[in-house]
Amino acid sequence: MASFCAIASATNCIPYSSSFSSNKSPLSSNRRKNPAIKFTCKAKNDNHKPETTSKNGENSPGKLDRRDVLLGLGGLYSTSLAVNPMALAKPALPDFKDCIDATQPNGTPINCCPPAVANIPDYVPSATTIRTRMAAQSFTVDSDYYNKYSSAIQKMRNLSLTDPRNFTQQANVHCAYCDGGYTQKGYPNLLYEIHNSWMFFPWHRWYLYFFEKICQNLIDDDTFTLPFWNWDAPEGMQIPPIFNSGVQSPLYNCLRNPAHLPPTVVNLDWSNDDVTVPPNVQIKYNLATMYKQMITQSKTPADFFGSPYRAGDETPEINTAGQIEQTPHNHVHSWTGTIVDPDNPIDMGALYSAARDPIFYAHHANIDRLWTIKLNQLKGTNFTDPDWLNAYFIFYNEEAKPVRVRIQDCLDPTKLGYTYEDVPIPWIDVSTKPKPRAKAKTLPSAPDPAQVFPITLDKPINVIVKRPKKSGSGSPEEILVIEGIEYDKKNYVKFNVYINEDDVNSSHPDNTEFLGSFSNLPHGHRMNVKTNKKFRISEVLEELGARDYDKVLVTLVPKSKPVRINGIKIEFDS
């Protein structure tokens, strides 16, 4: 890491490990090392057997029943059988008073905990003026906007480390929420995390909101808005100039991949071993990736946002990431960040450190913008589940005071006081849709999944998967499920998935046969993970001329350290 920062003198290029190696923080006053199980007895059901909890919070083995929490947190909650409303609440909530060490990818503990406070008030936004967040690539390093933004970040860097608005402490907010810094409220043996579920989009929207408010406060300009890195359109498919203006700039970060600095075009489905292609080809691949992820593979709220995450659930074992979180979100992170040590990626390349790079906020502003595009141009919908709407987070505002915010209050960005610049969205046009490399292929022979799985994916594998038989009327959507993906959360993980492709080396992101990828950004407190990955394939099979096939060929190609996979099947969308 030092080699990348040796020439740097600005504070934004001092290796962060020097200030994070200690487990002590000026903001921490109530940490504990590990989540402890605080219960000694089990609530019983009508058959006098221990209750269990399912994947959606009801009836499955190995989980606490919500009534157990009443017994576990210091004994019976009340002799008058009063109900603890937080113990019975179904939204997954962070226990802000019980922060623990997060974990770097190399396993070293890192303290990202904020100060402990009591009496946190609820916050409901009431914007009276709507400002426009502009595309980052439209600003130059000599613009008034650059001067404002760099001044705001520098002022954040200059704040005392005891101030939660300090730039490092703002980065720690992401670290704590994303790397296992909190346990679930009411479930002290379960870690809380906002990735890999329906928490991903709204948490980051609120995070950017308060970061933006802090910037406004520090430069005394309530018209200031964060920029968005418009990597989904050709004009923005490079690191924007304002973030690449030299080591003295507060917006610069020396821990980005040096091979990916301008004029290199971003790869929205990047793998560590990808071969660089001409810019015009990469742009074509990127637009096809955006169409596939935003339209073909994101037809329901769960596809787009990620699966539900309720009180008592574990994540990501129960929950699965939304399509956008995996691609392009993860890949822009890993493409941008430096992997000095493959076992310990840093800054944008790992979740615990990602928000230390100012470009993180522009990246996530574009992710947030995709949410507005999904609802407006693509006529998508939000979840209406009260367990999503009532879930809350806690942040520090521009006055360095803690506030509690709920998802239901961030669904309309204009109520938060911002909108996005109206820029071209070229991938929304059907001309960018991936196209078949060849139709109606004769499938090569390959084994049945039962003959192959479970398996460690250390080389490409082919399997022939039977399609389920339809019953009744209608045409239900078919879903390809990669089951039981086991990996170590601290590792960068990626593998590609192809369908009815007899030559994966000739298949690219703009081909229909390339379904997409599974990926993991290094992070996590508990390292071993088991989850699934799903792809919608009905439309894909139609385009490939395989509507009447009773079987399909599925190919998995590893692009990282090996992962273990337990099965592949096709099911109907429930």
Image (cartoon, rainbow, N blue to C red):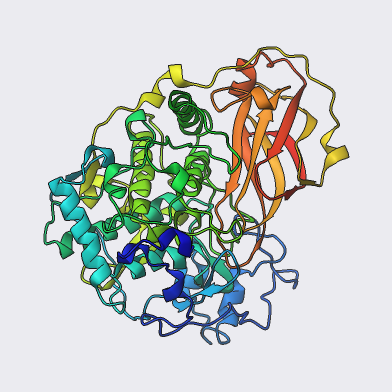
Left or right: residue 85 versus residue 341 is left
User: Residue at coordinates 36% horizontally, 36% vertically from top-left?
Assistant: 375
User: Residue at coordinates 51% horizontally, 62% vertically from top-left?
Assistant: 193
Q: Residue furthest right?
A: 451
* Residue 404 shows up from this direction: no
- Residue nearest the viewer, comparing 81 with 334: 334
Quarter of image, res 534: top right
| Quadrant assignment for the C terminus | top right
User: Which percent across, then down, holds residue 295?
Assistant: 47, 29
User: Residue at coordinates 16% horizontally, 48% vertically from top-left?
Assistant: 145
Q: Residue furthest front?
A: 7
User: Which percent across, then down, holds residue 9?
Assistant: 31, 65
* Residue 272 shows up from this direction: yes
User: Residue at coordinates 84% horizontally, 28% vertically from top-left?
Assistant: 446
Left or right: residue 24 versus residue 218 is right
- Residue nearest the viewer, comparing 20 with 494: 20
- Residue nearest the viewer, comparing 134 with 336: 336
- Residue nearest the viewer, comparing 19 with 170: 19
